[in-house]
Image (spheres, rainbow, N blue to C red):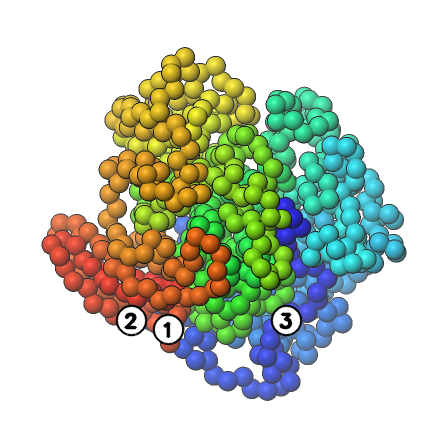
Amino acid sequence: MSGMRRFSRRGVLRAGLGAGATALAAGLTPRLPGPFELYESPAWAASAARQGASGAFPEWSRFARLADGAFDEDADPTRDMKPVIAALKSQNVNAIELDTIMSNWITEADFTQHLGKIKSFVELAHAAGIRVVMYYPSLEIISVGGEKGRSFYKDGDGKSWVQRGLDGKPNVFYGSLVVWVDPGDESCWVSPNSPWRDFYLGRIKALAGTGLDAVWPDVPIYFDGAISWCDTSTWAADAFRSDTGLALPTKADFGSLPFRRYVEWRHRNLLQWQLDIAAAGRSVNPDLVTFVETVSMDYQYATLVGLDGAYLRKAEGVSHVWEVDILGNYDGMRHATATDWTCLISMYKYARAASGTKPAWAFSYGWQADDASLVMAELLAAGCNPYEVKSPFKNDTTDAAMRTRMYAFVAANQEKLYNSASTAAVGVYHSSASRDFVSPAVGTGMYVNTRKPSGVKEWWASGSAEESCTNQQWLGEFRGTVKALVFAHIPFDTVTSPGLAAADLAGLRVLMLPNLQAVSDAEAGVLRDFVAGGGTVVITGPAPTALDELGSARSEYALADVLGFRKADPLPTTKQNRFGSGTCWYVQKLVGKSYLASTDQASADQLLGPVTAAAPPEVTLSGDRRIHLEVRRLGADTVVQLVNFTGFGDTPAAFKTAPTSCTVSLALPAGRRVLAATVSSPDGPSPAPQPVDWRLVGNTANVTLTVNQYALLAVTTG
């Protein structure tokens, strides 16, 4: 990356809450709430009293609307803490991420004293009906003024506990490399295998005793901003040898099996670290849950820093806060292309999938109110919980009125957003092993457009084309498949690979396997059974299932029987093969990658032809391809979400919202009829559902709508 990574704010000790906080602090009476300023869910909104799909997580976390809050060390509860809480409550926030001095190197005495402050804040927040989640970096320690003065690395345990690169250099740097470390400060990244482990877990236990509702460990990664391919400390060397029987590699070489084992081992090593954090908190407070801030999404960054969020998918009591980055630190998505928006959709849908049945909290970054609300619309359509912040830091809202309006909409429609079930019959398979080991290349591939638009400060990429996902062999094919489905208005679910089981494919009729090369025997068995049982798979790329889960060449394709050809056979350009009761479609070319780069219909047709034949959707959309369609079901309601990014084209241009008309068509099963249809939107004068007309054509109900940015249509049948 190009120094773009934000992770989280550090060193800013008061929430920037705008005029509302100022008025409250001054003792003024805030005005009564308007239609979008709902402190509680309105009477017409469905109740959130029942437990969600996973009993391991409390109900509040499944409906969380998050924002940052803080206090200074001299804060008085009544004078300073109450106004922060009241201002956030007035913006419809129901969970506060509390970010104070926990990023910094502090003494045990200061930490003990700080626990009292935290407890006071928690008690005040709970009295206001708001939950509190404590932010605490899991592997980074910042020493304020540490470049010239005392620091954890120079004067504490840093020299012993620090992460080290393959060349032995310590993972420590001084300010200005990243936005969250101020000039003159020191950032020291420590090994999770060092004595830091017990030290940190002890502090987590102490925090759990303050009444907090959750803890928020920040980015447990092998940070690569200063040093690549950490950690090779003696602590890591001992852990790696104990786990694998191997010595640590001395250079980055994907052609070497020991190095590839090291790449995969780092995922599991950090997984255990996260599990230990969650267990430590629950050992003191069984109701405490853990949300790990996870910056590595569906693209190549997880390979570089070790943190693969999908490894945590089935773990109880611990989920994610996904830091979904935008294009520009000081521009948001204002100069995105339409394809960049499909990349953002891909990230949010990956986040939802990788969190399993648990809540998936996610950053909703913005620069101005209009781009921020469109980003949040995509977050909500994916089924994530919003943590709204102004880029590049996280101590302020992009716009208080926008947050209030959007969060009122979320509160009013939370059952439809979070308790509905996907109706998608199509899945897109995200292979962690293929991401790690198929054609490793420079660049993370976060977005498509690498060239910073004129006048924009700090772009996600440095300008080199190799950083684009269009130049990534595995990721480009994955992202192009997502783009093809989005542009064709075909609802789909992302399916993540670690721990794949037959239950993960239940309800799917088609599974897309973009450039799937690296698979385990167990994984291949699940995929084989899916096809044998009647499923359809569409697999692309030049070496289908030719590698094992560590990237080593197989003597035979893992799915040779499903593919209908073997390694010794000439590689077909395309092939359709019946296997059991199902079908495998194979395409040699990377047609998804082609579609990602050029939006050529021929490539899309090769991908989507088998999809529409095997799983014709029951809900279709007539309208611009840049309207994102999601379909879910809640009781008798078919819940349709529409996000409009038609203001964006093939090249970056000034941000605009272009209200667009479209028609949603719902095929009615025999014997059922439409009882009602309503539309809710954060773009209108109220989040309340409004009745809309529908017309019947045969057994199809059609609803025509004009979508500004985001609309939620509910069609009730009976």
Residue 708 in view here: yes
| Vertical placement of residue 369 versus 27, above or below | above
Q: Amino acid at mark 2?
A: Gln
Residue at 40%, 50% (x, y): give it. 53
Residue at the farthest front position: 454
Residue 493 in view here: no
Q: In the structure shown, which secondary structural element does the residue marked by tag 1 occupy?
A: loop
Tell whether label 1 touches label 2 (CB within 8 Å): yes
Q: Quadrant of residue 506?
A: top left
Residue at the farthest bottom position: 28
Q: Which residue is mark 2?
A: 690
Q: Could you tell me residue 4's position as x and y percent?
A: 63, 52
Q: Amino acid at mark 3?
A: Gly
Q: Which residue is mark 3?
A: 16
| Vertical placement of residue 556 versus 35, above or below | above
- Of mark 2 and mark 3, the one earlier in the sequence is 3
> Cα distance, mark 3 to mark 1?
27 Å
Q: Which residue is mark 1?
A: 684
